[in-house]
Image (cartoon, rainbow, N blue to C red):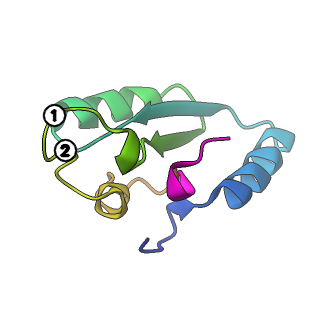
Amino acid sequence: MARNNKIRDLNELTALMQTLKAEGKRIAHSHGVFDLLHIGHIRHLEQARKLGDVLVVTLTADQYVNRGPHRPVFHEDLRAEASPPWNVLIMWLSPGGRWP
């Protein structure tokens, strides 16, 4: 997976969430496939962002996407990188499709 400042693994995300909660931050969460990112996704995430100080977006791992043949169109690494460029957006992508 390509690394950037928005993409965290589960351990990093857990530690960060504990820190943010200790600081009294409100954490909003949105989950989805977010394949073929479109204006509906953008609007959904913008509204979710308004519900907290930090938005955590989790992505469904490729192996769990059941949307028909040849889906998802974009591999999970690309879907994570293609997220909107908000400074506070934190993403966690299930490593190997294992969910906590």
**Viewer-closest of 41 and 94:** 94
Identify the secondary structure beneath mark 2. Answer: loop
Q: Residue furthest right?
A: 22
In the rendered structure, which segment of residues is drawn in magenta?
Answer: 94-100
Instruction: Report the residue at 35% width, 34% height from top.
Output: 46
The numbered dot on residue 9 is none
Q: Which residue is mark 2?
A: 71
Instruction: Report the residue at 80% width, 39% height from top.
Output: 21
Up/down of 43 relative to 10, above or below: above
Q: Residues within 10 Å of mark 2 (few under 14, many from 20)?
A: some
Identify the secondary structure beneath mark 1. Answer: loop
Instruction: Report the residue at 53% width, 40% height from top.
Output: 55
**Viewer-closest of 66 and 86:** 66
Question: In the rendered structure, which amino acid carries the disc numbered 1?
Answer: Gly
Instruction: Report the residue at 38% width, 57% height from top.
Output: 80
Q: CA distance from mark 2 to mark 1?
A: 6 Å
Point out the image quarter for the N terminus. Answer: bottom left
Residue 89 seen by the camera: no
Q: Position of residue 7 (x, y in %)?
A: 51, 62
The numbered dot on residue 68 is 1
**Viewer-closest of 20 and 96:** 96
Question: In the rendered structure, which amino acid carries the disc numbered 2?
Answer: Arg
Point out the image quarter for the C terminus. Answer: top right
Q: Is residue 50 left or right of residue 82?
A: right
The answer to whether residue 88 is magenta is no
* Label 2–label 1 contact, CB within 8 A: yes
Q: Position of residue 98 (x, y in %)?
A: 58, 48
Q: Residues within 10 Å of mark 1 (few under 14, many from 20)?
A: few
Q: Position of residue 52 (x, y in %)?
A: 58, 31
